[in-house]
């Protein structure tokens, strides 16, 4: 696969084993490395930021024991969760959850766009792949809820299914809006249609794209059950729902998967609507001309992740100051507000695109 | 504009969406000062108890609203019907014979408002209509025993009983003389 070679060669050409090791093995190792070096640390950083942010909103102090200002709190939490004794043995249904979750996770890592050189899958339909992966993540979460054999688990599983179905439709339509403007669903096309200037981002292109951006982000919250749309995981009424019986290592995996879904969705939203990885001040072009792909890749990754973090923080901000929505209100909102608005955005975006073509 | 017309429905829908956006945005704005540590920590964010908009004072309550019970002990006959009818046994009545056989001394009339469900049956069955609901509903206290309201006259002392016996004797004597 040519894309693989393009993606990996700048990174591994300095090592002599690159010639003798098969491509699929390098790709698999690359996925694990991306997961361990990008996504897990992002989860730790975002978890810390979220806790500090919500503490500020609620006039509390937040984590302040582990390390200076509590920055080591995620590490401490991880170590604590890893050494906790399992409360129950694995049952085969939970194994299904883990299987589906892991498959969804790693297949999504392969299609997640993390920079102009870090595009493993850049096909005509690549923008749809993370979307369906998010649906598979929701499916795995539903299986987990149903496997608990308890009322909170059943309710959580049903709510996950209802929210995923309700959120999928407007999310898909909003994705189409971005594709219409870019003229395709290739990551490289979508990135090329925008630039570093916020005025040329898809979200700012016209009011319809702006609506589409909002609809995309909010329907992602609905689809993946992220606060404040997390009725499937709510503690007060269904005792944590899907995750009510999880503890220790299982809870770690579950939380990471949940954060991963959120991060994935935010990365896609940034790439589709907020300019993606294009560096400001034409730095991308300069670095490309200077033939320093590693530097370019690192800068692009950091730039993309900082935009993503900003988006995640804004969503967290909204989630922390608004109450959790009831599940029927969430699905109602998705079907009756998000869907019509996404359709309006689609029609408008099509008209604007057609006008431009005339 | 016609009620229920298509346009009014759409307008109402858009107004609802706008209201939702403004509500979310407003709560986000409220939180910003707290993010930078300049939030007013002593400011009351919650609604105050006698909330000026929605809450009622006693005079605003509907005429048949049932607040705390009050017993007019002068009219009470000590028939204990309220005690019998009370579904939660929160009324305790003790009555003794007084000066003559036609009179009753209600020595204990306790209502435990920590048990009372304010059903109003006692006030309904009260023949002399001495037991009534007030409109007072604010009864927060620090100790449970403070919720017991006592309307009784107190136990009859031996001296009192002696006095009554003398009185009765005197009346009897007067009647004989006449």
Image (cartoon, grey):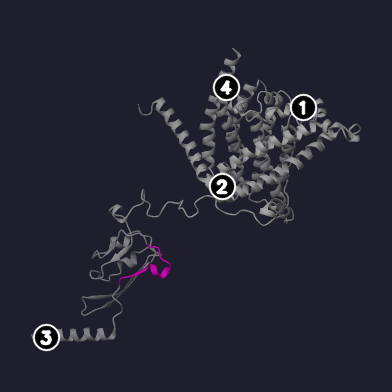
- What residue is pinned by disc 4? A349
The numbered disc on residue B174 is 3
Label 2 to label 4: alpha-carbon separation: 37 Å
Q: Is residue B146 magenta?
A: yes
Do badges 1 and 4 share one subunit?
Answer: yes
**Mark whose residue sits in front, 1 or 4:** 1
Q: Report the Cα–Cα distance between label 1 and label 2.
A: 40 Å
Q: Chain of mark 3?
A: B
**Structural distance between the alpha carbons of marks 1 and 3:** 128 Å
- The location of residue A299, given as percent across then percent down, is 73, 35
Tag 1 near tag 2, CB within 8 Å: no
Q: Position of residue B123 (x, y in %)?
A: 29, 62
Q: Secondary structure at mark 2?
A: helix
Q: Which residues are magenta?
A: B139-151
Q: Is residue A23 visible?
A: yes
Residue drawn 21% across and 80% down?
Answer: B99
Query: Considering the image in quadrants, where does the N terminus of chain B appear?
Result: top left
Which residue is labeled 2 in the image?
A: B35
């Amino acid at each position: 696969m040519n894309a693989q070679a393009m993606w990996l060669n700048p990174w591994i050409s300095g090592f002599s084993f690159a010639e003798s090791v098969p491509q699929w093995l390098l790709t698999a190792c690359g996925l694990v490395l991306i997961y361990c070096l990008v996504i897990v640390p992002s989860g730790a950083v975002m978890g810390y930021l979220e806790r500090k942010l919500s503490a500020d909103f609620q006039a509390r102090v937040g984590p302040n024991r582990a390390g200076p200002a509590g920055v080591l709190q995620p590490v401490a939490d991880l170590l604590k969760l890893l050494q906790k004794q399992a409360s129950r043995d694995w049952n085969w249904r939970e194994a299904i959850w883990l299987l589906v979750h892991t498959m969804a996770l790693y297949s999504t890592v392969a299609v997640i766009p993390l920079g102009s050189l870090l595009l493993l899958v850049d096909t005509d339909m690549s923008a749809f792949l993370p979307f369906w992966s998010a649906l598979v993540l929701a499916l795995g979460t539903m299986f987990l809820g149903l496997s608990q054999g308890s009322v909170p688990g059943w309710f959580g599983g049903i709510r996950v299914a209802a929210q995923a179905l309700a959120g999928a439709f407007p999310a898909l339509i909003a994705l189409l809006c971005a594709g219409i403007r870019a003229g395709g669903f290739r990551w490289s096309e979508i990135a090329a249609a925008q630039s570093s200037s916020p005025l040329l981002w898809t979200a700012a292109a016209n009011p319809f794209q702006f609506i589409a951006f909002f609809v995309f982000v909010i329907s992602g919250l609905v689809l993946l059950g992220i606060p404040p749309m997390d009725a499937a995981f709510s503690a007060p009424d269904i005792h944590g729902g899907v995750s009510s019986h999880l503890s220790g290592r299982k809870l770690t995996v579950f939380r990471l998967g949940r954060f991963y879904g959120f991060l994935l969705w935010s990365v896609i939203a940034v790439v589709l609507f907020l300019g993606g990885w294009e560096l400001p001040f034409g730095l991308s072009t300069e670095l490309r001309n200077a033939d320093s792909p590693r530097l370019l890749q690192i800068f692009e990754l950091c730039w993309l992740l900082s935009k993503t973090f900003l988006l995640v923080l804004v969503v967290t901000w909204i989630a922390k100051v608004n109450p959790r929505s009831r599940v029927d209100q969430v699905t109602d909102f998705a079907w009756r507000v998000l869907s019509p608005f996404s359709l309006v955005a689609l029609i408008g975006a099509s008209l604007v695109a057609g006008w431009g073509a005339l | 504009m016609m009620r229920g017309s298509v346009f009014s429905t759409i307008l109402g829908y858009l107004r609802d969406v706008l209201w939702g956006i403004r509500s979310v945005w407003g709560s986000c704005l409220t939180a910003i000062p707290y993010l930078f540590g300049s939030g007013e920590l002593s400011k009351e964010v919650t609604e105050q108890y006698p909330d000026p908009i929605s809450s009622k004072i006693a005079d605003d309550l509907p005429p048949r609203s049932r607040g705390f019970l009050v017993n007019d002990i002068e009219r009470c006959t000590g028939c204990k019907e309220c005690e019998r009818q009370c579904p939660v046994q929160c009324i305790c009545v003790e009555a003794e014979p007084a000066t003559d056989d036609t009179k009753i001394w209600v020595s204990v009339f306790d209502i435990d408002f920590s048990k009372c469900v304010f059903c109003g049956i006692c006030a309904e069955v009260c023949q002399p209509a001495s037991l009534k609901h007030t409109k007072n509903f604010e009864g927060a206290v620090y100790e449970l025993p403070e919720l017991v309201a006592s309307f009784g006259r107190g136990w009859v002392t031996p001296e009192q009983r002696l006095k009554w016996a003398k009185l009765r004797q005197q009346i009897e004597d007067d009647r004989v003389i006449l």
